[in-house]
Amino acid sequence: MKFSHVGIPVFEKQDDMVLIDACKVWVTDCATSTYKVEYLFFEPDSPMPAAIQDETHIAYEVDDLEAAVEGKSILVPICEPMPGLKMAFIYDEGLAVELLQIEG
């Protein structure tokens, strides 16, 4: 497991955000942040759970996403929001955790 980023919900969309249509969320690119911060702005009809829309989350890259979520409390099941990227959200140790598997 490798640290990826910290996700922080915001209440105003920023100019540099891009839309992840499947989740109805606008995000900044954490790769451009010194501290690997991703800001998230959720559309009113976003299907994402409140624990993700309302709370900061931490994200990790994993080699085997299915193994990483096994036995965990699932907030968002494994999905592929964009080609080459599989993700899931779990709730563990009192916070939302995003797990990412990057293909290729």
Image (cartoon, rainbow, N blue to C red):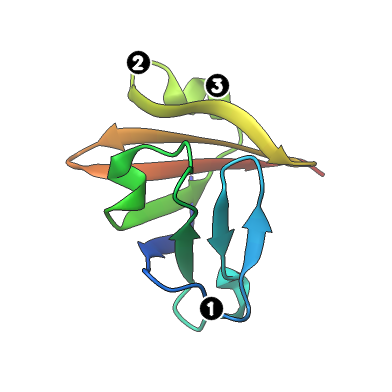
Q: Amino acid at mark 1?
A: Gln
Image x and y of residue 48, in percent:
44, 39
Image x and y of residue 12, in percent:
43, 73
- Residue occupying the point 25% across, 35% down: 92
Identify which residue, 84 or 62, lies in the foreground. 84
Q: Residue furthest top?
A: 71
Q: Amino acid at mark 3?
A: Glu
The disc placed on residue 66 is 3
Split into 4 quadrants, where in the image is the C terminus?
top right
The disc placed on residue 53 is none
Q: Is residue 5 visible?
A: no
- Residue occupying the point 53% across, 80% down: 33
Identify which residue, 26 or 58, lies in the foreground. 26
Numbered disc 3: secondary structure: helix
Numbered disc 2: secondary structure: loop
Task: Identify the residue position indicated by label 1 in the image.
Answer: 14
Image x and y of residue 103, in percent:
76, 41
